[in-house]
Image: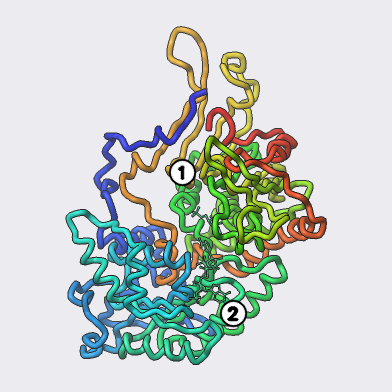
Amino acid sequence: MATFSSAHCRPHATTPPSSLSRPRLSPSDCEHRRRVTLSSIPSSAQSPSRLRRSCCANAVRVQEGAGAATIIPVENELPWKKSKDSLSLTVPEVENINISKNESTVSITVVGASGDLAKKKIFPALFALFCEGCLPEHFSIYGYARSKMTDADLRNMISKSLTCRIDRSENCEEKMDQFLKRCFYHSGHYDSLENFAELDKKLKLHEGRRISNRLFYLSIPPNIFVDAVRCSSSSAASGNGWTRVIVEKPFGWDSESSAALTKALKQYLEENQIFRIDHYLGKELVENLSILRFSNLIFEPLWSRQYIRNVQLIFSEDFGTEGRGGYFDNYGIIRDIMQNHLLQILTLFAMETPVSLDAEDIRNEKVKVLRCMKPLHLDDVVIGQYTSHKEGSTTYPAYTDDKTVPKGSLTPTFAAAALFINNARWEGVPFLMKAGKALQDRRTEIRVQFRHVPGNLYNQKHGTEFDQATNELVIRVQPDEAIYLMINNKVPGLEMKLDCSNLNLCYAARYPKEIPDAYERLLLDAIDGERRLFIRSDELDAAWAIFTPVLKEIEEKKTVPESYPYGSQGPVGAHCLAARYNIQWGDLGTGQ
Ligand SMILES: NC(=O)C1=CN([C@@H]2O[C@H](COP(=O)(O)OP(=O)(O)OC[C@H]3O[C@@H](n4cnc5c(N)ncnc54)[C@H](OP(=O)(O)O)[C@@H]3O)[C@@H](O)[C@H]2O)C=CC1
Ligand SMILES: O=C1O[C@H](COP(=O)(O)O)[C@@H](O)[C@H](O)[C@H]1O
């Protein structure tokens, strides 16, 4: 059987059609993106979010506050049209301009700006959006945290993690300068109404008389989410535009705590103001799942228990908790990866065709899948924890060697589970999940193993096991994004010999441009008010209902995780779990 490696994915000389051959996004790509989205929306669509998309935010403004969204016609407002001159304006200059009340601004406040996620992902994503011309003309970015910093300190901190995704011919330094001039810092406590009121004053200064739209990104530990929401919504919500809050995971710890968090947030915010982020939904190949299924006639007829033997959702990282042990030990791999990232992928994979591309129609279908799933129990779960491993002169640490992890911790760093969807399409099909840290490689994949060909004429002609000669569709989310289908093929020559080959779509070869980071897409959607890729509260409840029983069981029984060496394939138990359903993990087979 032919093996598939990332080497197959190297860019080659094939030139894609001209419409796809752009090496990177140009400043007009955001408008292009909106037009593309629009073209797939029926003209009869009249919901606020559709209107917002269809008008590129130019002709309507959707105001969210208490109650339902209202649509206000706005004349001559072209918030996405860029005036180059305006980019280098500083605050006093902005104030001196005769600002029209019809203009709008977007202020993005990163709460927890001094933290790891803000530095690593949020500020770089905002910069990429700026470079691509995707941020509105009037925008400002604020860092908010307790650390004492000046605007200059924040800019210095951010600049260290910015990378340029623009043409070499363009001046990256200049872009960075323009971007950093729009970044400001305010030091404050997360539970201080007064400190957020001071922030409000600063925001107003920049907003002038414009309609002010405000986005708060809660990049802080979950125990302070509610304080930050209470204070920001009471002291720094917009008076005349929208206010939205992006909430980072984890959304609770189990069903009860998640419901309590939702209840607490809803004291201050409407559901339509809460954007629960799961960054896996912003990944290109996850976003592509629906397109693959619903715009290609060849897949949908096969997408059921009739043709699919099992589906595997695999997440593996080749590094341990390294520095995040303090957070991780409270949650473990099931809460960190399975209950959110892998389960979200599963719902998109398994849902029925939505009525439209509208966020609510899609989320309705996703929630139906979750509600058809059996809660998970320990019989169908294997947990593991990595131990130290020595390779030559290098010693890789055990999970419990991490100084932030309590000695003797039983927290799983690996889990495998078999889940089932009890509906007409999927009954009896195992959805196997596997997630682990400190494994042999880094990958996230969806693997779809099809049934055997009945009465296969060619059984004896295969050089490999009959079981491995079934078709397998692999959607590799990362790294080296690809979609490939393993098919049986005649080996060229005079003898009748079959092997397994790949029909493959390697993104690097087919689309030679950098794929935007998930956070870029999601931040842009939040600014646009597009909720499709964010998690609704009923989805969250249904997701916790599946995992809470097993999490409780593991904790109550103090189940000891099976050990596996750092850098290995994970615990043996994962193979046994798969074997119980007559399945082999696709990522460990010969044709991976
Ligand atoms: N880092 C990552 O890769 C990912 C993170 N997340 C989630 O994003 C959020 C932020 O993550 P991350 O940046 O790693 O978090 P950090 O631990 O870096 O915290 C962010 C900031 O919050 C403040 N802070 C930290 N601990 C406390 C505390 N106990 N009380 C009050 N303030 C505190 C600190 O700012 P200061 O002291 O200046 O106030 C810190 O810089 C979390 O909810 C996390 O679960 C989700 C996915 C990935
Ligand atoms: O949410 C999380 O995701 C990261 C993996 O994200 P990726 O985009 O780098 O694949 C994971 O390392 C972390 O533990 C988890 O909290």
Q: Amino acid at mark 1?
A: Asn
The residue nearer to you, when weighing 453 against 412, is 412
Identify the image quadrant of residue 182.
bottom left
Q: Is residue 355 visible in this depiction of the protein?
A: yes
Question: Which residue is identified by label 2?
Answer: 226
User: Please, is residue 501 above or below residue 219 in the view?
Assistant: above
Identify the image quadrant of residue 183.
bottom left
Horizontally, residue 443 falls left or right of residue 552, namely left
Tell me the number on the disc at residue 239.
Answer: none
Horizontally, residue 507 falls left or right of residue 474, namely left
- Residue in view at x 67 percent, y 46 percent: 416
> How far from the left and from the top, in percent, is residue 555?
77, 59
Q: Is residue 366 visible in this depiction of the protein?
A: no
Give neighbour class at mark 1: few <14, some 14-19, many 20+ (Cα, 10 Å). few
Q: Residue furthest right?
A: 557
CB at disc 1 and ligand 2 closer than 8 Å = no
CB at disc 2 and ligand 1 closer than 8 Å = no
**Secondary structure of the residue carrying numbered label 1:** loop
> How far from the left and from the top, in percent, is residue 31?
30, 64
Q: Residue furthest top?
A: 494
Tell me the number on the disc at residue 296.
Answer: 1
> How far from the left and from the top, in percent, is residue 301?
56, 41
User: Please, is residue 476 above or below residue 123 in the view?
Assistant: above
> How far from the left and from the top, in percent, is residue 287?
47, 54
User: Please, is residue 317 above or below residue 501 in the view?
Assistant: below
- Residue in view at x 57 percent, y 56 percent: 341
Label located before the other in sequence (1 or 2): 2
- Residue in view at x 57 percent, y 54 percent: 321
Q: Amino acid at mark 2?
A: Val
Horizontally, residue 372 falls left or right of residue 362, namely right
